[in-house]
Image (cartoon, rainbow, N blue to C red):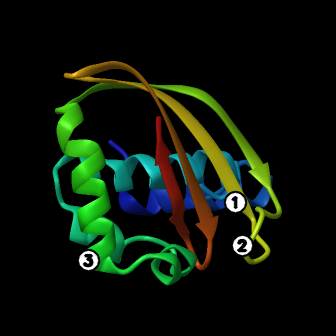
Amino acid sequence: MQTRRDVVTWLSALSLVGLARPLAADEPAEDKAERAARAWLSLVDAGRYPESWDEAAPVFKGAVTKAQWQQALGAVRAPLGPCLSRRLVSRRLVESLPGAPRGPYVVIQLAAEFEKKKEALETITPALDGGWHVASYFIK
């Protein structure tokens, strides 16, 4: 049976030879951004539109008020019904977007299926601003 001291000694030895690293330290920006985007989409999927605005990037909040966001999203998403599935189509790291402050950003496209719209394309773009936060969201 290993004691706490044995585990600490083992981890210390690994770190000395460069094998132990924080789990997410080397995680690609695209992975972090996609995870943040999917978490944000879960708010939208749950109809928690005010919270999705609260969790968005400052550039997003500067473009639309919370009330405008709730109204626009309700008009676009409610008629589609619940989201049944999403599949990653593409994602790419970019340093800039037209009309937006310098990035980085990750432009993510997801093929989505909704109850009342079988084929939709969502484009969601998180920005890095102390963490990854959604800067834009479009659906067609």
Marks 3 and 2, how far apart at CA: 22 Å
Q: Can residue 37 be seen here?
A: yes
Task: Give the side of residue 64 with respect to residue 27, left or right.
Answer: left
Looking at the image, which residue is at 77% across and 60% down?
16
Above or below, comparing residue 111 to residue 41 in the picture: above
Where residue 4 appears, x then y in whole percent?
38, 60
**Disc on the earlier residue, 3 or 2:** 3
- Is 94 rendered above or below residue 87? below
Question: Circle 2 sits on which residue?
Answer: 100
Which amino acid is tagged 2?
Ala
The residue type indicated by label 3 comes to: Ala
Decide: marks 2, 1 in contact (CB < 8 A)? yes
Residue 74: give x, y in percent of width and height: 22, 54
Q: Could you tell me residue 108's position as x and y percent?
A: 60, 42
Q: Which mark is residue 67?
A: 3
Three-letter residue code for mark 1: Tyr
- Which residue is tagged 1? 105
Q: Is label 2 in a helix, a strand or a loop?
A: loop
What whole-number distance in Å separates the C-alpha atoms at marks 1 and 3?
A: 25 Å
